[in-house]
Image: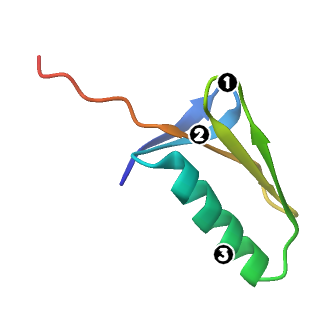
Amino acid sequence: MFNATYKGKHGTTVEHDDPKRQAYKYMALAQGQGRHTSTTWHADGCITVSVDGLEPLTFELAQPVSAA
C-alpha cells in the first residue's frame, strides 16, 4: 500500500509496505511499454528506478505510524 510520496534524499520517494516488490512492478510496467529501466540500490535500503524519459522514482519501506 502506498503511504506517502515526497521529495526525499534520493529524489521523488514513495513509501510502500513492500518497496522491492513495488519497484519490480514499476519496472515491469515501464519495460512492457518498451522503455529502458535501471535500478540503484542504496545502502539505506531504498531502491531508485530510472525509466527513460521519466524522473527517477525511489521506493522505501513505509515507517509504522505510532499512536499518539
Q: Position of residue 63 (x, y in %)?
A: 37, 29
Q: 25 left or right of 9?
A: left
Find disc 3 in the rendering and name its residue: 29
* 8 is higher (above) or lower (below) than 30: above
> Which residue: 72% across, 30% down?
42
Residue 36 rendering spot, x and y as whole percentages: 88, 68
Colouring of the image:
rainbow
Q: Nearer the viewer, residue 41 or 3?
A: 41
Q: Is residue 3 above or below residue 62?
A: below
For the residues carrying marks 1 and 3, which lies nearer the camera in this image? 3
Depth order, front residue of 26/45 = 45
Query: Residue sitting at 53 percent across and 57 percent down?
Result: 21
Secondary structure state at the residue bearing disc 2: strand
Q: In which image quadrant can residue 6 be found?
A: top right
Q: Which amino acid, mark 1?
A: Lys
For badge 3, the amino acid type reads Leu
Q: Residue at x 67, y 41 (%)?
A: 47
Residue at the disc numbered 1: 9
Which residue is labeled 2 in the image? 13
- How far separated are the C-alphas under marks 2 and 1? 8 Å
Q: Residue at x 52, y 47 (%)?
A: 19
- Judged from this view, the residue extending furthest toward the top is 68
Quarter residue 52 falls in = bottom right
Residue 43 to residue 12: above or below? above
> Farthest residue toward the left?
68
Q: Report the Cα–Cα distance between label 1 and label 3.
A: 25 Å
Instruction: Note whether 52 is above or below 30 in the view shown.
Output: above
How far is mark 2 from mark 3, CA to CA?
18 Å
